[in-house]
Image: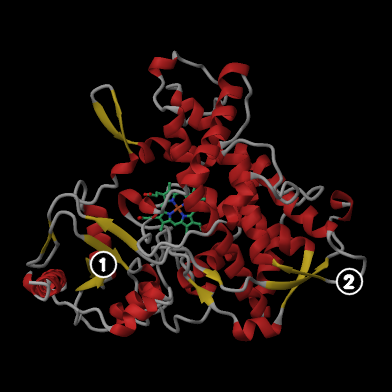
């Protein structure tokens, strides 16, 4: 009897694991040879297993457009063809919806992302530009303050840029007049250092909520909303537009003033607003910081690229150290550099979708069932020789012939392979805002400093995706900064 029990238990576990790991074979999909090996378990236990790299390997391992793989006990369908991925993400309405952006008003169900998209329109952004620029100046002031006369300053620029990102979020999304370079104990700064690894969080929609912070962040939102609704504070930021939306006021247009409505009629509760703000915080914090970091890493290694970029920046009017919003749109070479950074180092390496309603995959005999996950390995596609020649080389000019913002490459293919901001209904609503804050950081750094990489670090620099999913350099980015003699008046 005592012997029978463990045998039965073992058999049950063995059969159910085998059942899971034969999912794709049973459904007739091409699939990887599956199974949990001892070395895999060891790596997983020591937290050494590299998911992003494993998925890239699976992408490269064959020619089929679809491949069934397993992420631990989760059968996942990997899309290995860009055109197919685009078709699925663009045309599969209703089959892969992210439910968390749904909201109900009266008897109707809406997608909140669609409603909020006008917050990031050109007119709105141009009026928020003053706030963005102020945050950029905080970064420069902080670096200048730490410099000893005549000596180059050595800093981990990746860390500084993460604080810059937090400052952007604090000022524009949480509506706080705050400089986290000075308030190191602020809750948003603590959020930075609280890394939460999650092996399943490739999709932004399911990044883990840091519960210990959620309540404190909700308090911040509550206070900021009260200031605007009860005391009439008007501040040109994203929070103001969220509060306008909560009160049924237009998000597009050019009004910033609030026309409050009764509490019972409000469209978003404080709890929901805090959730939206925290979601924006999660999706933008690392993405913005890593894009500036990797752009600097690349251009500082390629003097010619750096020179071209500086030449373009030199043309900006820059009166009293202040940039003009309209001029930033004309930075063609910088746009190409940003695109190339997002190609080589997409902050989000994989796009995931969970199937809500079974879906027949286009031009194939296969159907993906409800509850199963589909993955688009953005990083692997962006580094595929088939689409981009010499994919590991940083070549901004490969985007020279871009005719639209989706991207057409000078070499090899003419298909729209660049999908750094996603595609379809869930693509990045904040992309214009992201480009703006990234450009401000880059321009201000390049205008004010000579930057030099730590040559020893570059040799051993390790790019990491842990904690998942965002990309960063494992040991930061050590850079020597020396002040350029311009803008002295404004920054002294
Ligand atoms: C370089 C910076 C950024 C990159 C590369 C980026 C990239 C992306 C990508 C690839 C997606 C699609 C995810 C999917 O399809 O599942 C996405 C979604 C999104 N992005 Fe961005 N993003 C950036 C910055 C921002 C910023 C600054 C904001 C707003 C402040 C923002 C807001 C969003 C939102 C709200 C979504 C939808 C998320 C969801 O469906 O859960 N992003 N972004």
Q: Secondary structure at mark 2?
A: loop
| Camera-nearest label, 1 or 2 | 2
Marked residue nearer the N-terminal end (1 or 2): 1
* Marks 1,2: beta carbons within 8 A: no
**Along the horizontal axis of the image, is 374 left or right of 232?**
left
Label ID, residue 83:
1
Residue 108 position within the rendered picture, expressed as x and y whole percent measured from the top left? 25, 27
Q: Residue furthest front?
A: 1
**Along the horizontal axis of the image, is 287 left or right of 69?**
right
**Image height of 277 relative to 450, above or below:** above
Residue 128 position within the rendered picture, expressed as x and y whole percent measured from the top left? 61, 39
Label ID, residue 151:
2
Q: Quadrant of the N terminus?
A: bottom left
**Along the horizontal axis of the image, is 182 left or right of 278?**
right
Between the C-alphas of marks 1 and 2, the distance is 52 Å
**Image height of 197 relative to 106, above or below:** below
| Residue depicted at x 36% and y 39% | 114
Residue 196 position within the rendered picture, expressed as x and y whole percent measured from the top left? 48, 59
Of 86 and 34, nearer the camera is 34
The quadrant holding residue 40 is: bottom left
Of 367 and 398, nearer the camera is 367
Q: Visible in this render: residue 431?
A: no
Residue 211 position within the rendered picture, expressed as x and y whole percent measured from the top left? 46, 45
Q: Secondary structure at mark 1?
A: helix
Q: Visible in this render: residue 288?
A: yes
Coloring scheme of the render? secondary structure
Mark 1, Cα crowd under 10 Å, few <14 / some 14-19 / many 20+, is some
| Residue depicted at x 24% and y 71% | 70
Q: Residue furthest top?
A: 262
| Residue depicted at x 42% and y 82% | 389
**Along the horizontal axis of the image, is 40 left or right of 178?**
left
Mark 2, Cα crowd under 10 Å, few <14 / some 14-19 / many 20+, is few
């Amino acid at each position: 009897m005592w012997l029978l029990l463990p045998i039965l238990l073992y058999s049950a576990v063995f059969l159910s694991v085998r059942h899971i790991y034969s999912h794709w074979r049973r459904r007739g999909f091409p699939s990887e040879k599956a199974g949990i090996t001892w070395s895999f378990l060891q790596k997983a236990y020591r937290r050494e297993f590299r998911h992003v790299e494993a998925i890239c390997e699976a992408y490269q391992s064959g020619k089929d457009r679809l491949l069934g793989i397993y992420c631990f006990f989760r059968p996942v369908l990997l899309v290995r063809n860009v055109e197919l991925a685009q078709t699925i993400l663009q045309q599969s309405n209703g089959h892969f919806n992210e439910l968390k952006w749904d909201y109900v008003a009266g008897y109707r169900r809406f997608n909140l992302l669609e409603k909020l998209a006008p917050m990031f329109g050109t007119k709105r952004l141009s009026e928020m530009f003053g706030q963005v620029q102020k945050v950029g100046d905080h970064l420069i002031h902080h670096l200048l303050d730490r410099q000893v006369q005549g000596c180059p300053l050595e800093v981990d620029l990746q860390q500084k840029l993460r604080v810059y990102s937090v400052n952007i979020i604090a000022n524009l999304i949480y509506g706080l007049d705050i400089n986290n370079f000075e308030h190191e104990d602020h809750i948003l700064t603590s959020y930075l250092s609280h890394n939460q690894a999650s092996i399943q969080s490739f999709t932004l929609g399911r990044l883990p909520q840091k519960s210990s912070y959620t309540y404190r962040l909700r308090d911040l939102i509550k206070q900021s909303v009260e200031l605007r609704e009860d005391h009439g504070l008007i501040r040109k930021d994203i929070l103001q537009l969220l509060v306008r939306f909560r009160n049924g006021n237009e998000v597009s247009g050019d009004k910033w003033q609030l026309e409050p409505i009764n509490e019972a009629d409000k469209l978003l509760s404080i709890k929901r607003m805090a959730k939206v703000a925290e979601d924006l915080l999660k999706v933008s914090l690392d993405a913005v910081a890593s894009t500036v970091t990797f752009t600097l890493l690349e251009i500082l290694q390629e003097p010619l690229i750096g020179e071209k970029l500086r030449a373009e920046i030199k043309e900006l009017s820059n009166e009293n150290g202040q940039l003009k919003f309209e001029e930033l749109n004309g930075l063609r070479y910088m746009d190409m550099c940003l695109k190339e950074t997002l190609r080589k180092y997409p902050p989000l390496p994989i796009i995931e979708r969970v199937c809500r309603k079974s879906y027949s995959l286009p031009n194939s005999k296969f159907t993906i069932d409800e509850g199963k996950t589909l993955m688009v390995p953005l990083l692997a596609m962006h580094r595929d020789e088939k689409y981009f020649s010499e994919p590991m080389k940083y070549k901004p000019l490969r985007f020279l012939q871009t005719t639209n913002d989706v991207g057409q490459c000078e070499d090899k293919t003419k298909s729209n392979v660049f999908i750094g901001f996603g595609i379809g209904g869930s693509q990045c609503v904040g992309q214009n805002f992201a480009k703006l804050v990234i450009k401000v950081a880059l321009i201000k750094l390049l205008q004010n400093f000579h930057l030099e990489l730590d040559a020893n670090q570059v040799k051993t620099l390790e790019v990491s995706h842990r904690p998942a999913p965002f990309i960063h350099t494992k040991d930061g980015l050590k850079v020597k900064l020396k002040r350029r003699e311009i803008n002295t008046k404004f920054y002294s």
